[in-house]
Image: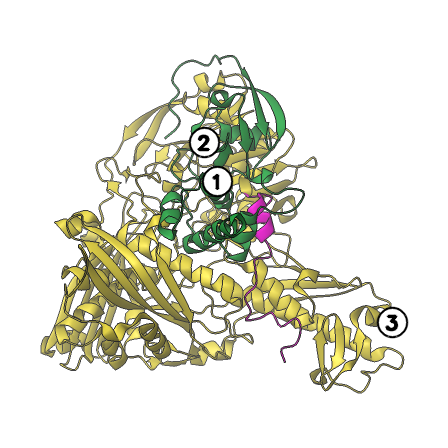
Chain colours: A green, B yellow
């Protein structure tokens, strides 16, 4: 059940990558098969982004890259050279939580907390996308993020609250 | 008027909430160390046999690879089984990673590749070449059924079935109404979102600080100490946050063994993280074949109750859980026969999974009771009321409290059960059939001996410590609430530290016992601090409390004051200053009451009502509404408690409709070992869930009246869904999960 790299013991050359992570420019030399998730967790010590499956099946590793939510386990770091990455660590500004982070606390939208950074990054991007208008749509568009503790209804409540508040503000 | 600091029973946000929504909360694989090395596990490709040869040369040649550990070069470990047995181990010989060339189950760890970087270790692991000699394996319970046996040695804390009472067979033969059927629930894997991981930090003095994904820091610590022959002072396990576990974490898993071995051999820090695939290479909820026979009079009253279960275990341990006892615990019957047997297959030993035993046994009996309701032509709720067990008949004890009747009543009212047309296929919503079903849930209210420490400092801050854990249950928050209320402090003044083996003794977290056990220990420690504080306050010169007894005062907002004259009092800090102490501290234990458990049985109960929509053409089932009415004694924090039940219900939806670990009996291993093919409920699968906490006055189990909530939410849910599917479609599916093929077939 190990990864399927075949071949010899000689390693390919490391490739330079430049990313803007949470507003900070970071330059690293990485193996070609280093994925963005491992780069964040192991190379930049940004462990807020979680590894749940490494196969793009659970959403725990969701981060926002150039405004879009992606599974960071499914992106080789070299493919994202030059990108702007926002992780859970970059959502709070000057100690003030992002409204969705606060809404997650208010609605108890998590238990163990492991899927939470991915849920929140996914939710923040979903709200930006502006396409979720109903609870059914929120549920559908949040279904790439598994929560084994089963906090789904509270997650929908939290996202709905922030969408509602944005709507109020926009009026 | 509610006094300030009255937190018990009030909804409170999680005290660890901010850490979790900002990514600051650190899980086992997220602790760093200088020179940290990364280990990747190589898993066996066969289910049974032995390793003929293992060639690690290519892996070792990869630059940055430090070592490849196999059975050929592993370090010496303890010799006896008892050294490998953890506090939750069933009888038998615990699995020993890399012990010898033998393969006893598919996916067994056979090598650990350790390298400077994760990517290098993963690459090198792919270069390990293994030749096997294969023996015939058997993973099919049906083919081992005839060799089932009663486990000769009982697993501690697991009650075997009670002796038969009356003449169940004879009564069944005479009974005018009968139900006889076989029920199955598929194998499930826990699949917490965080995969199992251990970061072993090799300290400069050679001691180990281990961040392990575990439901018991001290259980992991004593396992490591006894297996590797280390003194307990050389090993500390610290697991402040656990990314879900659901029973996958009480037993130390093989990544812990491998990480520790590598760290000791290499004398450097090592992290081993299992892949999602490898989460299917240790314990699981066992496949269980259940047979139920019910005999009843025309009025629905049971005259015979038989419930038999045959469950898988491994070839090396006799796993056990309570599967069949629940039937008689829920329903009165004079003629009862319950049996429980094991059959061995070539997999890893099953391990406890959320509501172990009950989630299986109650699913079966509650499906059978629905069948009886139809056979007798009686409403399912009414049938349960007619057979309501007023006492624990098997143990001949009375219940400490049991508000199950109120669960049925309040749940049915909220759901609108009275409007149900009992006729199957009688309700429709557009192209979908509509079904309403219900079931009962039950779980034991357990307490385990647990210790906690409270330290109040003169600045008004209180620190609470215990080795217990928070796997997402809300332990941090409820302990903080109990401590703050007991000592009369704002919650913000209380810091709770748990999940560390160096803290006061606690068993693993599990069985829904943590709130009652650790909660009572924290309460006791705070009560001791109260007494000392009060003593200091009375001893002050011209103390306004000099003539008061502790019953006449209250502790509020950092003051001790007279109940009938709240303006008269002493600030904690003043009392401490007068006594010349900087801190007041106490460590106390809480244990289950022996007298109570001799005379009484304690259980939580629930009534689950479910609305399903079934698209007959597609075979798709949607659980559009759930009402779960729960009676579980004192609800410490309605907010986190509700979340516990929501999570249990979602787990139940998974069991009813989605979750199934499929064994390939030819290969002897699980086929769908990933989250794309092992389906768990996602957001779009979950609609409205309404949780009702039924008021239940509990005063015998522990002073706070806590019963626990971790399991009760899952018990009953799957059966209620299955019963609703029958009501919708007229099709009785007795093998969970109820997947499309079973409805279309």
Disc 2, SS: helix
Disc 3, SS: helix
> Quick check: can you spot residue A138?
yes
Q: Can you identify the residue that label 3 sits on?
A: B578
Viewer-nearest of labels 3 and 1? 1
* Along the viewing direction, whichever of B4 and B593 lies nearer the viewer: B4
> Quick check: can you spot residue B512?
no
Asked if residue B25 lies in the magenta stretch, the reply is yes
Q: Residue at x 41, y 59 (%)?
A: B646
Q: Can you identify the residue that label 1 sits on?
A: A128
Q: Main secondary structure of the magenta part?
A: loop
> Percent from the top left, x then y, of residue B78?
51, 42
Asked if residue B633 lies in the magenta stretch, the reply is no
Which subunit holds the residue at mark 2?
A
Q: Is B582 on the left or on the right of B256, as rendered?
A: right
Q: Is residue A159 above or below residue B63?
A: below
Q: Distance between the Cα atoms at labels 3 and 1?
A: 59 Å
Q: Can you identify the residue that label 2 sits on?
A: A73
Query: Where are the magenta residues, as a range?
Result: B1-27
* Along the viewing direction, whichever of B383 and B286 lies nearer the viewer: B383
Viewer-nearest of labels 2 and 3? 2
> Percent from the top left, x then y, of residue B422?
17, 71
Mark 2 and mark 1 lie on one chain; the one further toward the N terminus is 2
* Along the viewing direction, whichever of B664 and B680 lies nearer the viewer: B680
Q: Distance between the Cα atoms at labels 2 and 3?
A: 60 Å
Are labels 3 and 1 on one chain? no
């Amino acid at each position: 059940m190990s990864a399927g790299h075949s071949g010899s013991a000689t390693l390919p050359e490391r490739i330079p990558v430049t990313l803007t992570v949470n507003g900070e420019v970071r330059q690293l030399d990485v193996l070609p098969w280093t994925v963005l998730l491992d780069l964040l967790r192991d190379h930049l010590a940004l462990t807020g982004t979680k590894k749940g499956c490494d196969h793009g099946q659970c959403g725990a590793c969701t981060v926002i890259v150039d405004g879009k939510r992606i599974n960071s386990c499914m992106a080789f770091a070299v493919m994202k050279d030059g990108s702007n990455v926002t992780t859970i660590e970059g959502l709070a500004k000057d100690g003030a939580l992002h409204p969705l982070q606060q809404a997650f606390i208010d609605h108890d939208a998590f238990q163990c907390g492991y899927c939470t950074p991915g849920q929140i990054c996914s939710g923040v991007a979903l709200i930006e996308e502006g396409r979720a208008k109903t609870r059914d749509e929120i549920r559908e568009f949040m279904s790439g993020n598994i929560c084994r503790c089963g906090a789904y209804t509270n997650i929908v409540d939290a996202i709905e609250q922030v969408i509602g508040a944005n709507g109020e503000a926009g009026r | 008027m509610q006094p300030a600091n009255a937190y018990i029973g009030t909804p409170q946000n999680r005290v660890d909430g901010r850490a979790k929504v900002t990514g600051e909360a650190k899980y086992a694989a997220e602790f760093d160390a200088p020179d940290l090395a990364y280990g990747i596990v190589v898993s066996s490709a066969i289910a049974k046999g032995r390793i003929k040869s293992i060639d690690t040369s290519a892996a070792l040649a990869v630059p940055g690879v430090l070592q490849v550990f196999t059975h050929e070069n592993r370090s010496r470990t303890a010799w006896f089984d008892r050294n490998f047995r953890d506090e939750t181990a069933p009888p038998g010989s615990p699995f020993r990673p890399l012990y010898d060339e033998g393969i006893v189950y598919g996916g067994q760890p056979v090598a650990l590749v350790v390298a400077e970087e994760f990517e290098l270790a993963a690459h090198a692991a792919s270069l390990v070449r293994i030749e096997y000699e294969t023996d015939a394996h058997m993973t099919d319970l049906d083919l081992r059924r005839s060799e089932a046996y009663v486990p000769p040695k009982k697993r501690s804390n697991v009650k075997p079935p009670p002796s038969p009472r009356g003449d169940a067979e004879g009564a069944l033969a005479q009974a005018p109404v009968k139900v006889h059927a076989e029920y199955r629930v598929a194998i499930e894997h826990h699949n917490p979102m965080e995969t199992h991981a251990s970061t072993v930090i090799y300290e400069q003095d050679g001691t180990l600080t281990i961040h392990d994904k575990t439901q018991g820091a001290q259980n992991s610590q004593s396992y490591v100490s006894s297996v590797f022959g280390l003194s307990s002072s050389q090993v500390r396990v610290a697991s402040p946050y656990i990314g879900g576990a659901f029973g996958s974490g009480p037993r130390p898993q093989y990544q812990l063994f491998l990480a520790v071995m590598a760290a000791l051999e290499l004398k450097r820090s090592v992290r081993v993280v299992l892949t999602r695939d490898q989460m299917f290479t240790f314990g699981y909820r066992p496949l269980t074949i259940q047979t139920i026979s019910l005999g009843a009079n025309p009025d629905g009253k049971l005259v015979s109750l038989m419930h038999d279960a045959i469950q898988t275990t491994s070839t090396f341990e006799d796993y056990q859980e309570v599967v069949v006892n629940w039937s008689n615990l829920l329903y009165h019957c004079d003629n009862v026969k319950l049996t429980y047997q094991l059959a061995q297959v070539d997999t890893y030993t099953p391990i406890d999974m959320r509501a172990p035993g009950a989630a299986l046994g109650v699913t079966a009996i509650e499906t059978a009771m629905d069948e009886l309701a139809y056979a007798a032509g009686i409403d399912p709720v009414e049938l349960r009321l007619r057979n309501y067990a007023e006492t624990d008949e098997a143990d001949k004890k009375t219940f400490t409290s049991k508000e199950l009747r109120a669960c049925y009543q309040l749940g049915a009212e909220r759901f609108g059960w009275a409007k149900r047309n009992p006729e199957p296929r009688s309700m429709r919503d557009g192209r979908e059939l509509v079904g309403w079903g219900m079931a009962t849930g039950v779980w034991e209210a357990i307490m385990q001996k647990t210790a906690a420490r409270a330290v109040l400092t003169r600045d008004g801050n209180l620190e609470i410590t215990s080795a217990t854990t928070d796997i997402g249950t809300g332990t941090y928050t409820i302990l903080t609430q109990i401590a703050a209320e007991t000592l009369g402090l704002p919650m913000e003044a209380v810091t709770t530290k748990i999940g560390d083996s160096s803290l006061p003794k606690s068993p693993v977290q599990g069985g829904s016992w943590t709130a009652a056990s650790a909660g009572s220990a924290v309460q006791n420690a705070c009560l001791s601090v109260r007494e000392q504080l009060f003593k200091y306050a009375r001893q002050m010169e011209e103390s306004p409390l000099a003539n008061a007894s502790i019953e006449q005062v209250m502790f509020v907002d950092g003051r001790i004051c007279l109940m009938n004259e709240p303006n008269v009092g002493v600030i904690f800090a003043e009392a401490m200053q007068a006594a010349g102490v900087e801190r007041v501290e106490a460590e106390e234990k809480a244990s289950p009451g022996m007298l109570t458990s001799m005379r009484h049985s304690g259980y939580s109960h629930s009534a689950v009502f479910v609305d399903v929509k079934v698209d007959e053409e597609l075979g798709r089932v949607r659980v559009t509404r759930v009402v779960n009415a729960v009676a579980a004694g004192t609800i410490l924090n309605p907010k986190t408690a509700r979340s516990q039940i929501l999570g249990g219900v979602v787990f139940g939806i998974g069991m009813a409709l989605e979750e199934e670990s499929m064994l390939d009996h030819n290969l002897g291993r699980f086929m769908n070992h990933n989250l794309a093919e092992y389906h768990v409920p996602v957001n779009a699968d979950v609609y409205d869930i309404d949780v009702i906490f039924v008021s239940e006055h509990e005063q015998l189990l522990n002073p706070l009246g806590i019963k626990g909530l971790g399991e009760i939410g899952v018990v009953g849910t799957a059966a209620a869904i299955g019963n609703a599917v029958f009501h919708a479609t007229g099709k009785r599916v007795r093998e969970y999960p109820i997947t499309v093929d079973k409805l279309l077939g």
